[in-house]
Amino acid sequence: MEIFKKFSFIFLVLCSALSANAEVQRHKFVIEATKVKRLCKTHNTITVNGMFPGPTLEIKNGDTLEVLVVNKARYNVTIHWHGVRQMRTGWADGPEFVTQCPIRPGGSYTYRFTVQGQEGTLWWHAHSSWLRATVYGALIIRPRDGESYPFPKPKRETPILLGEWWDANPIDVVREATRTGAAPNVSDAYTINGQPGDLYKCSSKETTIVPINSGEVNLLRVINAALNQPLFFKVANHKLTVVGADASYTKPFTTSVLMLGPGQTTDVLIRGDQPPSRYYMAARAYQSAQNAPFDNTTTTAILEYKSTACTAKKCKASAPIMPSLPAYNDTNTVTAFSQSFRSREKVEVPTDIDESLFFTVGLGLNNCPPNFSKSRCQGPNGTRFTASMNNVSFVLPRNFSLLQAHQQGIPGVFTTDFPGTPPQKFDYTGNVSRSLFQPVPGTKLYKLKYGSRVQIVLQDTSIVTPENHPIHLHGYDFYIIAEGFGNFNPKTDTSKFNLVDPPLRNTVGVPVNGWAVIRFVADNPGVWIMHCHLDVHINWGLAMAFLVENGVGELQSIQSPPPDLPIC
């Protein structure tokens, strides 16, 4: 008993030492329509505080955020803090009808949560319809006071938010696609920090400029905030040293090109080691789905040397140097890049797996319902596009959030029979029978006991078309222990598992026509959605949710819902 008291005292001292420098940061986000001009045309764009992109939040590991969100727009809205663990604070996670009902026009809600044990770059975005096309911003988490980066302190830091712009109202675009059953119109431009750049009409005056001095090392915090497109990113003539991803430090490696799926972040060091001049940083699509239309444009910003040699007119007069980007379908480059990621040190990967799950991820086609006109079935051969995991196309509830229904024991909102393996085994990446194209709609959750060690094989399918799917799990980070092509084979592919230093991520790019294996410990009670971060696929149902049960006592149980939680 005496020893226990002593340990308790030491634990309390450590906790108070850690929290001594922690701050509570308070912000107000006003969601409102703002006039934004891009590509020669002005739109009434939904923004936060009139800014596009929205404000960058800068905090320290251990800080608490309180963000009052006031909805002055005409649409429902929620805000998701992408990649934040939300330990026991699921009510602040943000996905509409999963952890909360939306904030209605005229309503408000305060998100309160503590960021603990995470450092690097995350981001926040709307999690309601397609509002995140313009409602997003960076969330930067620095080390605690007195602690430092595990790499030399950069001279300056620049968030690089890669976005996607429609020369239309994005909500109208998705509503039209929902009506017709066809794929939505592709975007008209990509953006860097909200600006399309020199290669688009009416854009070159506003092109984003990123300053650098000769000899200095700067940190670029790259975020793919695009709605539907994985993107390559490159800086002309400069190498990039990757030092972090999804707010976890990585073993440094050097590359000339990055590829980020929507939702992913990558921290890179860039050295001012080239002749003083202006260099384009550019991003364009990685498109793995065959015969699918995509936005084939290129966004640019300018890396501009600030040294004396470059302030003369000659730098401004000459056109910036352009990088050569990979071909849009260069899967080999993507594979080499994603397989370079390692954790900085040896990590404790969960072994002795309690839940060994196998989820197919992919598209599908629904036959045209008898009561629908042809104009509502404009998918391939008169069908409607859909998507699923393990043949279940996820349907969000409308009258309650899943977390509310779970916490209050409201019947009839969801079931807990999501299949842990595909209902039918088939050649996932081969020629799939047309009879397997139509999934079953449902609001099915998979139940996990608190503390259970989970492994999930995520398997792409070639139904309609194979594609690289960025799969994001809310409320958790996970280790990506392996990835490969073809059908996952438990007999031979387990030999590829990295159980020593796999990377810790919150979003995994499941390779086109391939698979990825992730592991995590279910230590955060609540309801957590796992979905494809291509928003077109979420609308079609490429999602599921875990119900993680409470453990023992208060510290292993979800907190009570806040009093201002929006009601449906």
Image (cartoon, rainbow, N blue to C red):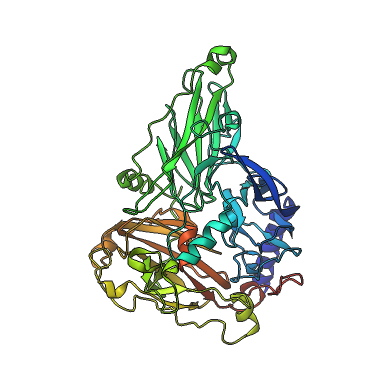
Which quadrant would the N terminus be assigned to in this image? Answer: bottom right
Which quadrant would the C terminus be assigned to in this image? Answer: bottom right
Name which residue lies at 27% across and 60% down. 495
The answer to whether 504 is drawn above or below residue 320 in the figure is below
Asked whether residue 497 is in view, the answer is: yes
Task: Find residue 348 and report its horizontal and vertical position in percent.
Answer: 45, 60
Q: Is residue 198 left or right of residue 19?
A: left
Name which residue lies at 36% across and 53% down. 292
Asked whether residue 531 is in view, the answer is: no
Find residue 493 and report its image quarter. bottom left
The answer to whether 23 is drawn above or below residue 281 in the figure is below
Residue at the extreme bottom of the image, as rendered: 411
The answer to whether 205 is drawn above or below residue 545 in the figure is above
Task: Find residue 384 and report its horizontal and vertical position in percent.
Answer: 40, 68
The answer to whether 107 is drawn above or below residue 219 in the figure is below
Name which residue lies at 60% across and 79% down. 552
Task: Find residue 199 and report its horizontal and vertical position in percent.
Answer: 48, 32
Q: Is residue 129 left or right of residue 30?
A: left
Find residue 410 and report its image quarter. bottom right
In the foreground, 300 or 479: 300
In the foreground, 478 or 14: 478
Total tally of numbered discs in the picture = 0
